[in-house]
Structures are given as C-alpha cells and as structure tokens.
Image: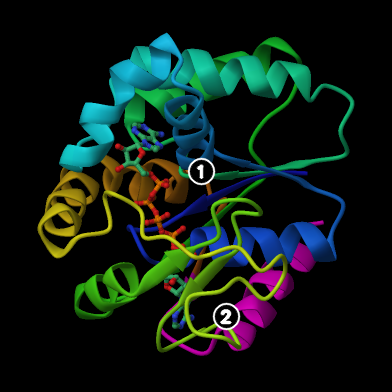
Amino acid sequence: MHIVLLGPPGAGKGTQAKRLTEAYDFVHLSSGDLLRAECRAGTELGRRVAEFIDAGRLVPDQMIVEVVLARLKALKGASGFLLDGFPRTITQAESLDAALQGCGEKIDLVLKLAVPDEYLVDRIVGRRTCPTCQHVYHVRFHPPIREGICDRDGASLVQRTDDTREVVLERLVAYAAQTRPLVDYYRRRGILREVDGARDIEDVLSDLRRAVDDAR
Ligand code: AP5
C-alpha cells in the first residue's frame, strides 16, 4: 500500500508515521528527515538546502523530487510505503504520480491531519528531538521522563533550527500557498481521508488505523 501523510507543520505527521509503521509493514520516508540528514552530513545537497529550511521556505521542487524518487526506487519490493512531507506541491505530486505509473503503481490513500493553526505554533516551538535516535518529544504534550534527556538512549534533546516562532509562521505561509492545493488534488481522485489531528496522539492514531484498514 502506498500512503501519503498530508498536513501542516506540527500536525503530527512524523509522530503518527512512526506509530503507523510500527503497526503495519510500511517503510516510513520523511522528506524533512532526508534533508536534515544531508545537512548533518555536510553534503553539497545539505549545504544547498539548509538556507531554505532555516528560512521556512520549501526546497526547490527539482532538488527534492530527485532525492525522494531515488529513495523510492531503492525501496522496490517493499510491501508498502508511507510518505511524510512529500509531495508538498502540485509539481511534486505530478512527478510522484508519473514515477509510480512508470512501474504500474499508484498512491492508494492520502491521510490528511487537520489541526487548527493556533495549535501548530505551540506544538512546534515546544518540540524537542533526540539527535541520535530522532525520537520526537514535546515539552508539555509528550515530555521525556527526565527533562531534556531522551528516554530511549539518554542523549540530550535538541531543538530544530527551524522550530522558532518566527520560522514557523513562514512555514505556515508556505503550507497555505503551496501545499494546501494538494488536498483538492487528491480529493478529486477519491483517495483523501481527513482525520481530526487536534486530539490525543492515541485517538488520532486509532482513526488513522481505521482509515488504513478500510482502504486495504
Ligand atoms: P519537515 O521536517 O517535513 O517539517 P514539517 O512538514 O514542517 O513538519 P514537522 O516535522 O514540523 O511536523 P510534523 O507534522 O511531523 O509534526 P510532529 O509529529 O513532529 O520539513 C522541514 C523543512 O524541510 C521544510 O520547511 C522545507 O524547507 C523542507 N522540506 C521538507 N520536505 C519538503 C518538500 N517535499 N518540498 C520542499 N521542501 C521540503 O509533531 C510536532 C510536535 O507536536 C511534537 O513535539 C509532537 O510531540 C507534538 N504532537 C504531535 N501530535 C500531537 C498531538 N496529537 N497532541 C499534542 N502534541 C502532539
């Protein structure tokens, strides 16, 4: 099964993607994680994308399409994938469709997490991430047992450079202008399922699982 997880910054895409891939045999592919890994590794691509990420702007389509499609190609044979953060523009969605069509495949389900803007800023500014295992916490909504320390491996938690109030507002503008049109793009095909993401993490997960089970 090929699934796209859609939603604004801070909607809970990464949080839910990890839980869904534990529950099903999907591969989780996060475009944001891929780009941040390039930045950490100091590659040429990482240097080129860092300024876009830190400014809260989308990376140019051509760059991200190349990276994600190469990863998808390498996944050939996997029983399914869950895309988180990609596609984010109509151009990216069309490139993805064309690539899948070339192998006789398609996107089967698009899960849209609906969360009002007023929740998103608090969620993002309070997010803390483990730099080694990438587990995601929130200082209030999902705190670690020991403040600032990852429950899983004891590393000191960090804040993403684009998780400031100022940059979040830019990311929300980019979402509204460039990514929201994808909702209609997928709705027209009858594969969009919208889930209320402004609830407890486990309640949101139950609805997402129901949507996946219905589509299987
Ligand atoms: P990316 O990493 O994809 O960021 P994003 O889409 O802005 O999403 P986030 O990671 O901020 O949020 P999320 O929805 O995953 O929320 P999370 O689960 O962590 O992209 C970063 C940048 O890379 C982009 O700005 C762009 O520059 C570039 N980029 C990436 N993909 C691109 C593409 N396709 N094209 C062009 N550029 C691209 O949750 C957030 C917080 O809330 C956490 O602390 C979590 O614990 C908490 N939380 C989660 N769910 C709940 C809940 N139900 N209740 C309370 N708290 C919750």
The residue positioned 80% from the left and 48% from the top of the image is 26
**Given the image, on which type of amino acid does mark 1 rest?**
Arg
Secondary structure, mark 1, is loop
The residue positioned 49% from the left and 65% from the top of the image is 157
The residue positioned 59% from the left and 18% from the top of the image is 69
Q: Mark 1 points at which residue?
A: 189
Residue neighbourhood size for the residue with mark 1, other residues' Cα within 10 Å, grouped as few (<14), some (14–19), many (≥20):
few
The residue positioned 79% from the left and 66% from the top of the image is 213
- Which numbered disc, 2 or 1, marks the residue closer to the eye? 2
Tag 2 and tag 1, C-beta contact below 8 Å: no
> How far from the left and from the top, in percent, is residue 195?
50, 73
| Ligand 1 within 8 angstroms of badge 2 C-beta | yes
Does residue 122 appear left or right of residue 136 in this picture?
left
Q: Name the residue under label 2.
A: 204
Q: Can residue 65 be seen in this view?
A: yes
Where, quadrant-wise, is the C terminus in this rendering? Answer: bottom right
Q: Which region of the structure is painted magenta?
A: 195-216
Where, quadrant-wise, is the N terminus in this rendering? Answer: top right
Q: Is residue 114 visible?
A: no
Colour scheme in the image? rainbow
Question: Which image quadrant shows ligand 1?
Answer: bottom left
> How far from the left and from the top, in percent, is residue 97?
55, 23
Which label was assigned to residue 40?
A: none
Secondary structure, mark 2, is helix
Q: Earlier in the sequence, mark 2 or mark 1?
A: 1
